[in-house]
Amino acid sequence: MDWRGWAEIVFTIALTVAVGWPLGIFVARVWAGERTWLDPVLKPVEALAYAGFGVDRNKGQNWLSYAAAALIFSAVGFVLLYLQLRFQNLLPLNPQGFDGLSPHLAFNTAVSFVSNTNWQSYAGEATMSNLSQMAGLAVHNFVSAGTGLAVAAAVARAFAADRGENLGNFWVDLTRVTLYVLLPVSFVTALALVAAGVPQTLLANVEATTVEGTKQVISLFPVASQEAIKQWGTNGGGLFNVNSAHPFENPTPLTNLIEVVSLNALAFGTVVAFGRVAMARREARALLAVMVILVGAAAAVIYSAETLTPQPAMISAGITDASSNMEGKEVRFGPAASSIWAAQTTGASNGSVNAMHGSFMPLGGGTAMFLMQLGEIIPGGVGSGLYGMVVMALLAVFVAGLMVGRTPEYLGKKVEAREIKFAMLAVLILPLAILGFSAIAAVLPVALEGLLNKGPHGLSEILYAYTSAAANNGSAFAGLTANAPWWNTTLGIAMLLGRFAYLVPVMAIAGSIAAKPKLAPTAGTLPSDNGLFVGLLIGIVLILGGLQFFPALALGPIVEHFQVLAASR
Amino acid sequence: MLSQLRPAIVSMVFFTAVLGLGYPLAVTGIAGALFPAQAGGSLIRNAQGEIVGSEWIGQNFKDPAYLHPRPSAAGKDGYDASSSSGSNLGPLNEDLAARIKGDADALRESDGQGPIPADAVTASGSGLDPHISPENATRQIIRIASARNTAPAEVAAIIAENTQGPTFGFLGRPRVNVLTANLALDARYPKAKAKGAVSQIQ
């Protein structure tokens, strides 16, 4: 570890917030349907879309109708994507002549991209045609993120409402955030990435004769356009097997900076936008502070683990350079850039990686796992991180209310039994899907066949997989060979639960919050914009996450850490 | 409910057209016009115009006259650019310990007993890492110089020319591009059978 590494970590987080803040202000304008400088180009496209959809842009929806729209849209997207992947061999733009996907892989992949998870059971360069990547997977990179941003808008409006039930129109929100936010930022980022060295071509493969005379087949894709939305949309599904560790996806420290900033900026920005629409700017800043503190702390823990933990394999080979764990890491990034990426990607339900988490030291990989288990709220997925954090804030004021014996309020809305029931329902999905499936897989021979590593690290591979799926992250301890019926099916179910069984209770909370009168704060109101609240919320997030998952983590990464220490003596 | 089916279906078609075709094709067109070399994969050609590789994609070098890359887990023999992969071995995996021990012993045999940098015995995340650390490159100078009958300082100079520092002084790590360094070595100090070719980035 050195000062450059710490500087890189601090600079990356600061730049991410600095980019996210103005973007959030813009997102608030888009949510509100206000004029933007993109109107001359996009307004006609938008009008054309509503005409085709048969949607009246001024007609609002209540929570049930809004949630139904989000679910139906995702269901239709799933069916079409499933068919497209299953039969990609019959479709054009398949220069490598890849076969259609098997039913379980097509199911897993379609769920994965519709739910904004982007878990990859497949190796992209050996499986997916150009059409499947561009017109299948990348489209869902946009619209699954757009769905998250739309639901976040509905939640923000619920807090602004005074005895109302109109949460906006899902189709309008989806169309506007996709066209006005996701598309332009991706377009600019894609061109910047190409300038910095990322390929963008429709040619399939290039055959090179290496200097030593062997053949090297180099896989190419339209990489940059997909890389950009994969990061901005907190999707994370790479074109290549190794994702952003691949030098074509991420060739230099500069492309790495662009990608890691775009990975979190919009999620931070959503919080700023929430503050404006919900008329709670100071409270939104408190939420942002919680996210920044936790993601910074996580990056520091991972960086320390990767640079300070002794490495038994190196010691036993008589190698004294133990300055950093380089297994699974790229020379151009090194431990600092890999650590901040790991923290941001697992904090954010993105799941793209620039180093192999499965080869991290136990506490490094364990921290990445723990970040996902906190519920993908620091800052979480685009939109979904915001509404996840709002659920946590409701629980925090509820706990504080219990301590002093008052009905809790958040942002001028009384928080009562109905909201807390739905909040708990949402929060309990994660342990159910993660621990339930992991427990079964840990004793099932057909599941254990997929493991690469033995002992605690093998358990970590299982735990990480279900954590990643249920939290809609998509990164992996990639030693696990997941392209098999058991893994594809159960991971697909975990992804569905994590996305949609969470989204419905959140929308129910939004409906119930919107219907309540907006109260002015009184002397008895717990302020939710100060340091005390930030501390309280961090405590709730960590204790909820810690208590649920600590026993499982103790059997995986924590015991492995002590094994590493013992083996290094 | 059924009234929402029409927007769901029509919007998927609309988004597929705009985002799935319009967006990537527009980026491809503009990128190809503005940055043709990068968009095409930063391919490197020899004097005869044949593609010898890409600036960003590592390839295997076994000849003692070349700078050797890191161990690779991509494909069966490593550096398979259509099959990127890390080893995914955990820190306590016996295969990892055995591989590192074997590689370290081989390096001491070929390049002397000096300290071995971490990147010389660890597999990268992609299996296609085009770079090695400057320490790793320095450790190979004597071997390369004697294989090419030239002074170590000459080899060191070429390595230095192909070394990049951290971006803005603190982003990423210092690194040596193995392929461009080896092409420069061939161009300036040809081996007996060297393919001898001045290369440029396409």
Image: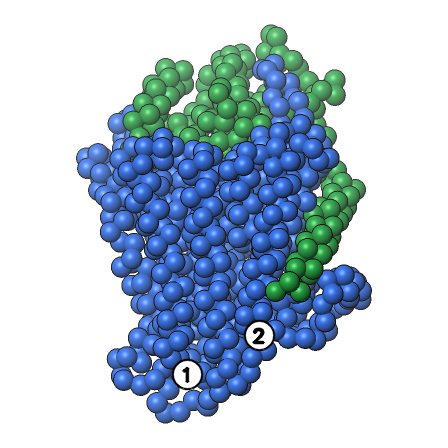
Can the viewer see residue A333 in this picture?
Answer: no
- Reply above or below: A405 against A554: below
Residue placed most toward the observer, A440 or B103: A440
- Where residue A400 sits, quadrant-wise, is bottom left
Mark 1 secondary-structure assignment: strand
- Reply above or below: A350 against A313: below
Chain with colour green in the figure:
B
- Reply above or below: B97 against A440: above
Chain with colour blue in the figure:
A
Q: Residue at x 48, y 64 (%)?
A: A504
The reply to whether callout 1 and callout 2 are in contact (CB within 8 Å) is no
Q: Dot 1 falls on which chain?
A: A
Q: Position of residue A133 (x, y in %)?
A: 64, 41
Instruction: Report the disc number at residue A414.
Output: 1
Q: Dot 2 falls on which chain?
A: A
Q: Residue at x 34, y 19 (%)?
A: B102
Which residue carries the number 2 mark? A62
Q: Mark 1 or mark 2, which has the lower sequence index? A: 2
Q: Position of residue A45 (x, y in %)?
A: 78, 61
Mark 2 secondary-structure assignment: loop
What residue type is disc 2 on?
A: Asn
Q: Report the side of A161 relative to A297 (left or right).
A: right
- Reply above or below: A391 against B186: below
